[in-house]
Image (tube, rainbow, N blue to C red):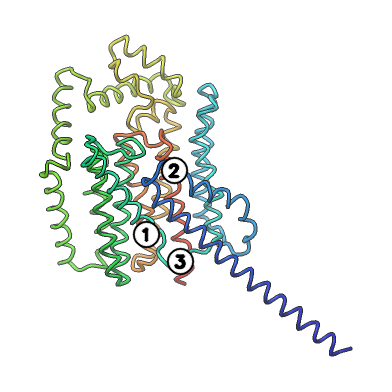
Amino acid sequence: MNSWFTLSRKHIAMGRGTLNSTNSSLYRYFSYFVWLLAAATLALTLSIPRGISYPTLCLFFLAIIFSIVFIKRSLSLTRQDALLIIVFALYGLSSIGFVYLDGWHVRELDRPSRFLLVLPVLILLLKSKMPNVPILFYGSILGAIAAALLAAHEVFVLGLPRAQVYSNAIMFGDTSMLLGLLNAVACFYFYHNKQKLMVYLAALAFCCGVLGSILSGSRGGWIAVPLIGLFILIQAKDLIGKKQLISILMALSVAAVAAIAIPQTGMQTRIAKAYEDIELYQQGKTFTSVGLRFEMWKGAFYLFSQAPILGVGEYGSKPLKADLARKGLMSKAATRFDHLHNEFFNTLAIKGLLGLVFLIALYLVPLKLFLSKLRQHHSNWNIKAYALCGALVPMSYMDFALTQSMFSHNIGIMVFIFFIVFFWCAVRWAEELNK
């Protein structure tokens, strides 16, 4: 009898071991699939129509259905995780509140709701162990190269004046530039890990991302290259020697001059056009691209004066802009745009000072979180690279915001929130893997 009980206990123990092993394998495969979807988001954002929607939608449904299964596997939520969740939630809820104040047009709930719907994905990624391979960088490399190939086809084969692929020219160009900058960081990550082939691929992807932006003719994104590029190089000064740093700076300078000088890039024409538009505006001609922006920005301050705390609302601004045009305070041609082509001015006019506070918090809180990780892991590129990429997202968006209302477009919101979430969770798991 005793031997029977002993045998039974052994079978139970073996059964538990098999069950634990099976659960462990399921967890591992599930986690790999989740992070593969994150990488696919980077790869497909500019490569196919609505490319950012498909993998992120899958992530959201997985978060809702399966996240509870692996709750014991999760990283514990930290104060920094909670801060990121709070700033996204506050911005989303406040934006819904502004929709209510503006007359509760239900279709306008789509964009702010995304700041809330990304939160389950954040939790899911914190529960799903990141594979010990730079899968996000593989995605960004594929995404930037695909974007450049599609842009080149439109400009050089189809003969379009500006590449826009599956978006509009500005959103495509700015997103392509961001992918390029992420791959600049990938170069240093692979250099640190002595993966020479991947260094070359990441460098190619960086050039492709910048090329996509150039072919789009989106001038606002070009400001980001020297400023953010210099920030990346400063962060990499511990990794590369002084001679290498000087060589990189010289190579980038030569490449920039060549890009401007070669007529086929269209960069020279776009820069000259900007100066011409400014001259025409000074002569009272407001019909140009730059002139219309100046008129919209001027109109923003008139709108802000009507409701400085809560703003006039998107729908409420329409009759007010028409009135400004009738009084000669704003060009009539500038009133036809849905937004004011500057995130800060647009927010100030539509949501007032309160909305501007939420917007600035949305930029600065994630930036501060990533910069703190950069300082904490200043010499560990296996963690630092993800933190640096995460910091580039709000930095780039603050630059893009000067000439475009990024959050007035679905792709603008989706890239911002998901790229931040991906790289934040990558930082957290990289910290865990490098303990």
Secondary structure beneath dot 3 equals: helix
The single residue placed furthest to the top in the displayed view is 326
- Residue at image position (14%, 57%) is 251
- Sequence-wise, the earlier of marks 3 and 1 is 1
Left or right placement of residue 43 versus residue 188 in this view:
right
Type of amino acid under label 2 = Met
Q: Is residue 22 visible?
A: yes
Type of amino acid under label 1 = Phe
Percent coordinates x, y for residue 120 in the rendering: 56, 49
How crowded pointer 1 is (Cα within 10 Å; few <14, some 14-19, many 20+) is rated as: many
- Sequence-wise, the earlier of marks 2 and 3 is 2
Secondary structure beneath dot 2 equals: helix
User: From what the image shows, is residue 427 above or below residue 336?
Assistant: below
How far apart are the two marked residues, 2 and 3, measured between alpha carbons?
Answer: 26 Å
Percent coordinates x, y for residue 45 in the rendering: 39, 46
Which residue matches tag 1? Answer: 137
Which residue matches tag 2? Answer: 414
- Residue at image position (33%, 35%) is 168
Quadrant hosting residue 401? top left
Q: Nearer the viewer, mark 3 or mark 1?
A: 1
Which residue matches tag 3? Answer: 431
How far apart are the two marked residues, 2 and 1, measured between alpha carbons?
Answer: 18 Å
